[in-house]
Image: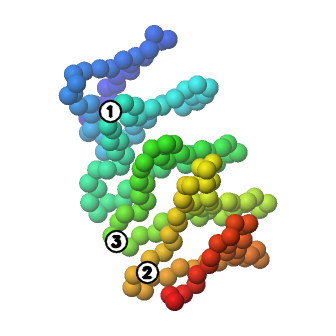
């Protein structure tokens, strides 16, 4: 390949790339060892990068190519090592949905909150800890583990406690299959 370049620049008048309703846009389709960067390197303020903003049914695929025996890594909001704040939201409010993490049928590890917590810092992991609706009719059901084969569940604590059913609401705790 030669060292040709194409630079497209736009001022405050915005930039619009558009085609027919059935057009396919390939960006970097022949790139094998290069980098594709989208978004400003120092974007601040009201800057937003939106992918899949249609009001119709959307499918947004990230890292879904057939990578065969190669390794595929997808990083989301993992670039900062400073004191900044990451807020990552998956799913929306007020809609019915399913979020699946780790659907592989092969051996896999799903690590949630798996970093080493810094000295003096606290890592809080909430699963199903949201409140029900104001009328108290909403239900939060949490299942951990599987009853199949040799499956197991391990609960660990350091010098702190493992608390089960310690809130002020009356409830039953069942241990065992009786």
Between discs 2 and 3, the one toward the N terminus: 3
Task: Classify 10 Å Cα crowding around label 1: few (below 14), some (14-19), many (20 and above).
Answer: few
* Nearer-N-terminus badge (1/3): 1
User: Picture coordinates of residue 9 (x, y %)?
Assistant: 42, 16
Question: Which residue is tagged 2?
Answer: 147
Question: Which residue is at 37% across, 56% downward?
Answer: 72
Task: Identify the residue at the far right of this view.
Answer: 120
Q: CA distance from mark 1 to mark 3?
A: 34 Å
Residue under the image location 26 percent in, 39 percent down: 30
**What secondary structure is marked by label 2?**
loop
Number of numbered labels in the structure image: 3
Check the image and report above or below for 177 versus 31: below
Locate residue 117, reporting x and y percent: 69, 62
**Dots 2 and 1: beta carbons under 8 Å?**
no
Query: Residue at 50% of width from left, 11% of height from top?
Result: 12
Q: Residue at x 55, y 26 (%)?
A: 47
User: Residue tagged by mark 3?
Assistant: 106
Q: Earlier in the sequence, mark 2 or mark 1?
A: 1
Would residue 172 be visible to someone looking at this image?
A: yes
- Density class for disc 3 (Cα within 10 Å; few <14, some 14-19, many ≥20) is few
Residue of label 1: 56
Examine the rendering and report whether any part of residue 111 can be seen.
Answer: no
Q: Is residue 166 above or below residue 99?
A: below
* Viewer-proximal residue among 29 and 146: 146
Left or right: residue 150 versus residue 168 is left
Q: Nearer the viewer, residue 138 or 14?
A: 138
Give the CA separation, mark 2 to mark 1: 40 Å
């Amino acid at each position: 390949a030669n060292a040709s370049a194409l630079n497209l620049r736009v001022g405050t008048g915005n930039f619009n790339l558009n085609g027919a309703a059935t057009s396919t846009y390939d960006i970097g389709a022949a790139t094998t060892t290069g980098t594709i960067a989208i978004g400003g390197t120092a974007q601040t303020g009201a800057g937003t990068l939106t992918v899949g903003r249609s009001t119709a049914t959307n499918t947004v695929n990230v890292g879904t190519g057939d990578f065969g025996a190669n390794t595929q890594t997808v990083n989301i909001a993992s670039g900062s090592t400073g004191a900044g704040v990451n807020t990552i939201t998956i799913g929306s409010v007020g809609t019915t949905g399913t979020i699946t993490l780790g659907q592989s049928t092969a051996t896999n590890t799903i690590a949630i909150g798996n970093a080493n917590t810094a000295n003096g810092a606290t890592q809080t992991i909430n699963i199903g800890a949201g409140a029900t609706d104001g009328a108290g009719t909403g239900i939060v059901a949490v299942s951990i583990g599987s009853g199949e084969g040799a499956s197991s569940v391990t609960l660990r604590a350091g010098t702190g406690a493992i608390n089960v059913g310690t809130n002020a609401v009356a409830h039953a705790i069942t241990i065992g299959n009786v």
